[in-house]
């Protein structure tokens, strides 16, 4: 027992030393950046209380967490200890209001929502453990959430880059592959199709079209019919460039294969079977690089570009919603933010009062 007691005290001392070292290394600036302190930065953080050291011993020995994880838990508890010190309370007597205030301060100090969520997770684990040990009956972190991170804007190409990709033609390339890939780009950018919708297109409707959820093209009516999310059908117009590219592709589509050995799919691989979504991604990425675009392009980027450029030209949000097949206009409204960015850029470049001297 004595040896075990010395062993436990040794580990507690080691953890406390690690905590002091981490704070000496990271704290002077990180506390201020984290927003947990409005005054001058801490230079000598208070030592962790015994219950915090016991918890760290628990996660290290019983849960067998990695040393790096234990280190991160130690930093989280040091942050929590500072919250308690500012409130003038022991660690186990903090209330939800104190935690919410700490979250607000960290957020105001520039810490990301994801970073705050990780800290809250560490704090929540400590109080859950303390409750199981009978040390507290209240978890002040319960129900406290980190601020939501702003949703990133869809990545869309500029008009010039999109047209450059659509117009790209490779000298010396296999005419069959060239015609196929050009037609795919035109449908993705000219119609805003999802990659799954493009993959699922047949040349014409057949007996299994509806059952398999396939789409098809109608060159005579200049339309493409697809089944999108939620098994919803929609029809989209084919522009002149898309029609021309499809006609060029259909003229060559079946030539490498024996009669009757060709799949019903509109876009085929070199074995005569339906081209997979993964292959479409790869071919588009390669084509964008060969076209000299600085950003590798994926299919959904062309869908975003279709929506953004159409909205810039027409301003008709409802029409864009219908063409994209969005069930709610709220989903489509994200493109208005892209449109605003475009307008702001035009203003900065063109308006005389926006020019910097």
Image (spheres, rainbow, N blue to C red):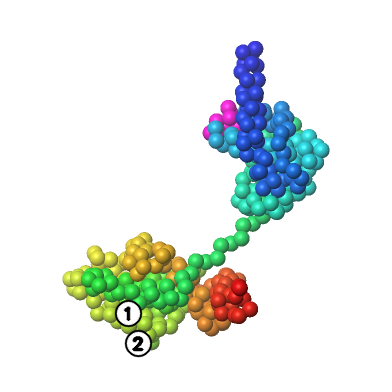
Q: CA distance from mark 2 to mark 1?
A: 14 Å
Of circles 2 and 1, the one toward us is 1
Does the magenta-highlighted stretch encompass residue 61?
yes
Residue 144 to residue 16: above or below: below
Q: Secondary structure at mark 2?
A: loop
Q: Residues within 10 Å of mark 1 (few under 14, many from 20)?
A: many
Q: Is residue 263 left or right of residue 222?
A: left
Q: Which mark is on residue 181?
A: none
Q: Could you tell me which quadrant the N terminus lies in?
A: top right
Query: What SS does tag 1 mark?
Result: helix
Residue that lies at the very extreme toward the right in this rendered image: 88
Residue occupying the far top of the picture = 2
Task: Locate residue 295: give its quadrant.
Answer: bottom left
Whether residue 85 is visible to the viewer of this picture, yes or no, is yes
Question: What residue did someone put label 2 on?
Answer: 220
The residue at which mark 1 appears reads as 245
Residue at 64 percent of width and 27 percent of height: 17
Q: Is residue 236 magenta?
A: no
Figure check: 165 above or below 142: below
| Magenta-drawn segment | 59-66
Front one among 249 and 163: 163
Mark with earlier residue (2, 1): 2
Residue in view at x 66 percent, y 43 percent: 29
Q: Is residue 336 visible?
A: no
Q: Residue at x 28, y 66 (%)?
A: 269
Indicate left or right for 324 with 222 as reference.
right
């Amino acid at each position: 027992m004595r040896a075990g007691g010395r062993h436990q005290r040794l580990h507690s001392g080691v953890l406390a030393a690690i905590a002091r070292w981490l704070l000496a290394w990271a704290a002077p600036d990180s506390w201020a950046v984290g927003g947990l302190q409005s005054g001058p930065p801490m230079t000598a953080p208070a030592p962790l209380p015994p219950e915090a050291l016991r918890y760290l011993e628990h996660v290290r020995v019983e849960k067998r967490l990695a040393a790096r994880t234990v280190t991160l838990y130690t930093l989280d508890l040091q942050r929590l200890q500072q919250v308690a010190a500012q409130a003038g309370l022991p660690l186990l007597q903090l209330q939800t209001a104190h935690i919410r205030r700490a979250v607000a301060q960290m957020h105001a100090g520039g810490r990301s929502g994801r970073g705050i969520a990780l800290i809250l997770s560490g704090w929540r684990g400590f109080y859950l453990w303390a409750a199981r040990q009978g040390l507290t009956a209240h978890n002040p972190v319960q129900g406290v959430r980190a601020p939501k991170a702003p949703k990133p804007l869809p990545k869309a190409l500029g008009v010039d880059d999109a047209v450059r990709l659509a117009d790209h033609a490779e000298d010396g390339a296999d005419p069959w592959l060239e015609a196929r890939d050009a037609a795919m780009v035109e449908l993705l950018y000219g119609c805003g199709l999802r990659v799954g919708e493009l993959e699922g297109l047949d040349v014409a409707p057949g007996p299994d079209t509806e059952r398999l959820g396939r789409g098809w093209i109608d060159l005579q009516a200049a339309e493409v019919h697809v089944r999108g999310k939620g098994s919803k059908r929609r029809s989209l117009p084919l522009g002149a460039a898309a029609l021309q590219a499809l006609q060029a592709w259909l003229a060559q589509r079946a030539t490498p294969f024996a009669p009757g050995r060709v799949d019903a799919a509109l876009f085929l691989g070199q074995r005569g079977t339906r081209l997979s979504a993964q292959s479409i991604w790869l071919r588009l990425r390669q084509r964008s690089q060969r076209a000299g675009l600085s950003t590798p392009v994926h299919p959904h980027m062309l869908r975003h570009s279709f929506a953004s450029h159409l909205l810039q030209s027409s301003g008709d949000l409802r029409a864009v919603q219908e063409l994209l097949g969005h069930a709610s206009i709220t989903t489509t409204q994200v493109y208005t933010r892209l449109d605003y960015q475009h307008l702001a850029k035009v203003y900065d470049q063109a308006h005389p009062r926006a020019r910097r001297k």
